[in-house]
Image (spheres, coloured by chain):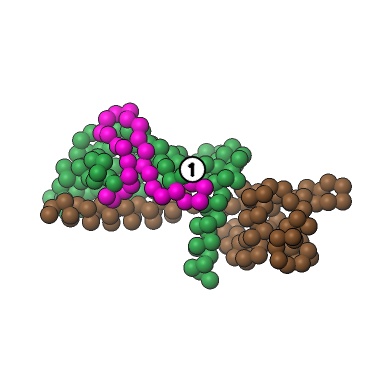
Chain colours: A brown, B green
Amino acid sequence: MTAADQLFSTLGDPTRRAIFERLCRKGEQTVWMLTDHAGVSQPAVSKHLSVLKQSGLVRDRREGRQTHYSADPKGLSPLIDWMSVYTAFWREKFDALEDLLKRMDQ
Amino acid sequence: MTETKSVVMEREIAHPPEKIWRALTQPHLIAEWLMQNDFKPALGHRFNLRTQAYGDWNGIIDCEVLTIEPNKTLSYTWESGNGPLRVTSVVTWTLTPTPTGTHLRMEQSGFRSDQPQNYAGAKYGWQAFLTKLEDVLAKTE
């Protein structure tokens, strides 16, 4: 499984994705703060967090008896492939340019 | 690590270079196939390409004309986004006449595969990416 495959499968779960998005939006959170909004039990949230951590999307930091979780943007980098994003973009633009050139004849 | 990459697209087009040049350099024509803009065919001219904002991305691309050789070559910088979504690149158009029209080549170069310094404060850029990712995932489900 490539890093991108792992990321897709990690973020393919809607609950897990919601937890990750919340960490992106709100910054550091405890498992309890996340459970309040996740709509699933605390053990389920902990399990999702451990999967997110394995994929490099989430970091944790112990402070006393609490663990604080935060999103790690670097974990997303295998998915940001500008080469393919822009290849698709320019193909579409080349088509639009050719359409325009045809219309310019009329 | 600063490894740069480029995207190249080439196409044989059944229209003369002069006509393609107009489509590449006249603002109202650029708007028809690329994006809204305030382009001027002048060396050093700074302009924007504007598309719909997407998530936290404002939809604006900052450009500056670097090379301009009528009917032959046009290049401009192409910079946009923030955080991990930041793109700094140069777009170069090359027009070569052929017996049937023009060989049109576009190269967008300077993508960096790793920009760790830009990750600081990156959370703002993520929203657009996440929304997009969600679309992709929805289609693959």
Q: Amino acid at mark 1?
A: Gly
Q: Given the current orientation, which residue lies at the most extreme front position?
A: A36
| Most foreground residue, B139 or A35 | A35
Task: Give how far across and how far down residue B84 sits, in percent.
Answer: 55, 45
B134 left or right of A39 in image:
left
Q: Can the viewer see residue B113 in this picture?
A: no
Q: Can the viewer see residue B102 in this picture?
A: yes
Q: Pointer 1 indicates a residue of which chain?
A: B
Q: Is residue B33 magenta?
A: yes
B92 left or right of A25 in image:
left
Task: Give how far across and how far down residue B19 sits, in percent.
Answer: 17, 45
The quadrant of the rendering that contains the N terminus of chain A is bottom right
Q: For the residue carrying disc 1, how many other residues have a C-alpha within 10 Å: few (<14), some (14-19), or many (20+)?
A: some
Q: Residue at x 78, y 64 (%)?
A: A42
Give the residue pinned by disc 1.
B81
Q: Residue at x 13, y 50 (%)?
A: B99
Q: Given the current orientation, which residue lies at the most extreme right position?
A: A65
Count of numbered circles in the view = 1
Q: Given the current orientation, which residue lies at the most extreme bottom position?
A: B141
Task: Give how far across and how far down residue A74 sits, in percent.
Answer: 61, 48
Residue B27 found in image quarter: top left
For label 1, the SS is loop
A47 left or right of B81 in image:
right
Q: Residue at x 19, y 48 (%)?
A: B102
Task: Give how far across and how far down residue A2 sits, in percent.
Answer: 58, 60
Q: Is residue B103 magenta?
A: no
| Most foreground residue, B108 or B132 | B132
Main secondary structure along the magenta-highlighted residues? loop
Q: Residue at x 32, y 33 (%)?
A: B65
The quadrant of the rendering that contains the C terminus of chain A is bottom left
Q: Which residues are magenta?
A: B32-57
